[in-house]
Image (spheres, rainbow, N blue to C red):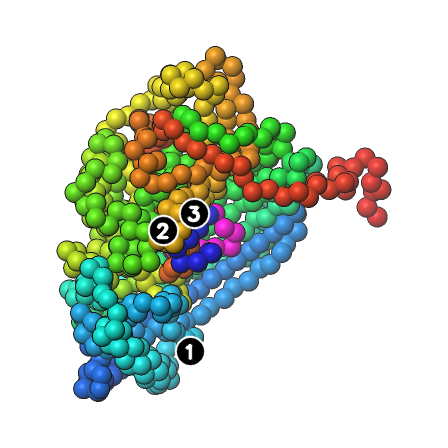
């Protein structure tokens, strides 16, 4: 991440994990959850009783304990890279001093905000006296830090102009929630996966174009416990399994060629079969081989068709980040849509919602699914755009003028402060066409504009966007598979070396039609509050004018010699 106003999003990164809610069982919650919550509540009551009477007074305290089991097995080029299991427990204490309207977190102009969250590793055992002591010590540290921060906030209020957006309260009052679900665990035999990652990456090495390959299997179980002084008491488990595949090649001109694939599942029995994985590997090898030979395309502006996965990333970058509520409050943000509620920002056939309560769509897992956000607020289905009209923003517990409450989108990676983030961004349309009709419409646009060709973006790695006021309000999306489509009926030509670029207010209005089925992109979004799992869902979109620029490239030549296994002059291994 370059800085807080640049957001690298939806990258399929190796060895990154997301988490999805495990289905609650019907049996009673385990005793250890109740014991842990009881200890946290006892210390919370004791702390609030004293600190609410201190000077300055604490008005809100929250304790979150996160248990994590983690397994990772990684292989490369036919060999095992690593294989490990890990357990950890993390404590986060939030102590707010002042009032809901003005507290220690209020932004002070000129003071760089801290996006990391104070926290500490704590004992794995449910040793209640030891745990309470660590909570007590962390609470004292955070209260002292908050007290000092409030002094600076009050000083700033006296000497600096306050913006209209800054008049919103610093923290929202939310109804308490209580949910105590079953504990989740993972039990992974690493040996079979060690054999699989060796075999999968060895299959990549059978191709002479593969410079490097990696297969990474990960499994994670997370149990989160949270109590706060408003009365919220939560305990729930999340589990997720993932297999990631990566192959790298290098074109004759030095450009790196990267292909990614991933499988996600919730139940061990739903792991992909070897046949499914090998079929995907063969596709990746064929695409890599073709891309090595594909010609470069020059910068271009003209009709472009994005298939569903590519369109999903497009909406995530171009619209989704700018609909995150805290960006409307920060004077350093571009605030593209801040004053546009009730206005038309998209064609009237497009609607967008963010619904983290959906675990699957058409039988496919959605990575951005969660039941409660990281501020203890129940996840909500938020309708952001209705027939092209902007309705609201994604909200954490940082209110806006006119939007006083969270809608369950306060999210973070462990060790970061929660802010409003996307979960499952889902785009729908009432102006749909079949794939064939979309293609025909693309060709019509190419002819109308007198262009020699149009572009078809078929797969995508990810992208990033700039939202800070000091930067151009632009986005960049990084395609992996791009075709030239010719108006005279010639076969499509695979090309490489381009990135999609543009500005949001213009690009969103250039959409002229969409496909009739939605595709899913599961990935990870990196921004101020760390890397969080997200899904983006969209139909294919046809854009009347899209600009592409040359992709960043390397000038290093490919290896002089072929890989040993593909060199007829190489001596046989002894």
Residue named by callout 3: 464
Which mark's residue is nearer the viewer, 3 or 1?
Answer: 3
Q: Is residue 211 above or below residue 297?
A: below
Residue at 46% over, 60% down: 187
- Please say whether residue 13 is one of the residues in the magenta stretch: yes
Q: Secondary structure at mark 2?
A: loop
Residue named by callout 2: 467
Residue at 66% over, 42% down: 555
Q: Residues within 10 Å of mark 1 (few under 14, many from 20)?
A: some
Residue 385 appears left or right of 518: left
Circle number at residue 258 = none
Task: Depth check: give the residue in front, 59 or 66.
Answer: 59
Residue named by callout 1: 123
The magenta segment: 12-18
Task: Depth check: give the residue in front, 114 or 192.
Answer: 114
Q: Residues within 10 Å of mark 3 (few under 14, many from 20)?
A: many
């Amino acid at each position: 991440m370059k800085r807080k106003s640049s957001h690298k999003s939806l990258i399929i990164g190796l060895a990154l994990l997301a988490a999805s809610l495990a289905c609650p069982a019907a049996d009673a919650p385990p005793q250890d959850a109740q014991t842990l919550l009881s200890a946290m509540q006892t210390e919370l009551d004791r702390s609030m009783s004293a600190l609410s009477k201190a000077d300055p007074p604490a008005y809100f305290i929250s304790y979150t304990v996160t248990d994590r089991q983690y397994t990772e097995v990684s292989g490369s080029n036919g060999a095992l890279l690593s294989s490990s299991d890990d357990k950890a427990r993390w404590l986060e204490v939030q102590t707010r001093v002042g009032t809901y309207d003005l507290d220690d977190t209020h932004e002070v102009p000129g003071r760089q905000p801290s996006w990391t969250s104070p926290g500490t590793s704590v004992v794995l055992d449910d040793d209640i006296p030891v745990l309470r002591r660590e909570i007590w010590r962390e609470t004292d540290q955070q209260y002292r830090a908050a007290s000092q921060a409030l002094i600076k906030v009050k000083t700033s209020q006296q000497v600096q102009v306050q913006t209209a957006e800054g008049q919103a309260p610093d923290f929202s009052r939310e109804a308490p929630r209580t949910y105590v679900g079953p504990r989740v665990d993972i039990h992974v035999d690493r040996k079979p996966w060690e054999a699989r990652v060796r075999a999968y990456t060895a299959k990549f090495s059978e191709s002479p174009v593969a410079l490097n390959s990696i297969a990474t299997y990960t499994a994670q179980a997370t149990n989160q416990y949270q109590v706060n002084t408003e009365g919220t008491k939560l305990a729930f488990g999340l589990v997720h399994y993932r297999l990631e595949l990566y192959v790298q090649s290098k074109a004759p001109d030095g450009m790196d060629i990267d292909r990614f694939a991933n499988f996600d599942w919730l139940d061990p029995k739903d792991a992909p079969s070897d046949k499914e994985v090998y079929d995907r590997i063969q596709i990746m090898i064929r695409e890599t081989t073709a891309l090595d030979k594909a010609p470069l395309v020059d910068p271009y502006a003209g009709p472009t068709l994005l298939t569903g996965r590519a369109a999903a990333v497009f909406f995530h970058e171009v619209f989704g980040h700018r609909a995150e509520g805290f960006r409307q409050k920060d004077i350093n943000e571009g605030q593209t849509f801040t004053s546009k509620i009730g206005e038309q920002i998209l064609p009237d056939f497009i609607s967008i919602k963010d619904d983290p309560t959906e675990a699957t769509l058409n039988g496919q897992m959605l990575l951005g699914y969660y039941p409660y956000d990281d501020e203890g607020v129940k996840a909500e289905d938020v309708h952001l755009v209705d027939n092209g009209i902007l309705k609201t923003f994604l909200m954490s517990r940082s209110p806006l003028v006119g939007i006083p409450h969270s809608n369950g989108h306060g999210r973070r990676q462990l060790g970061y402060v929660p802010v409003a983030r996307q979960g499952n961004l889902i785009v729908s349309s009432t102006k749909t066409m079949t794939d064939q009709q979309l293609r025909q419409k693309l060709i019509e646009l190419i002819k109308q504009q007198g262009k020699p060709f149009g572009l078809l973006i078929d797969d995508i790695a990810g992208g990033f966007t700039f939202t800070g006021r000091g930067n151009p309000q632009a986005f960049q999306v990084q395609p992996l598979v791009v075709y030239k489509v010719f108006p005279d009926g010639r076969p499509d030509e695979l090309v490489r070396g381009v990135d999609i670029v543009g500005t949001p207010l213009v690009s969103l209005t250039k959409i002229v039609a969409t496909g009739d089925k939605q595709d899913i992109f599961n990935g990870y979004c990196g921004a101020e509050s760390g890397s969080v799992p997200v899904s983006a869902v969209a139909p294919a979109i046809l854009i009347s004018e899209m600009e592409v620029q040359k992709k960043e490239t390397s000038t290093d030549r490919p290896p002089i010699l072929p890989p040993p296994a593909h060199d007829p002059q190489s001596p046989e291994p002894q």
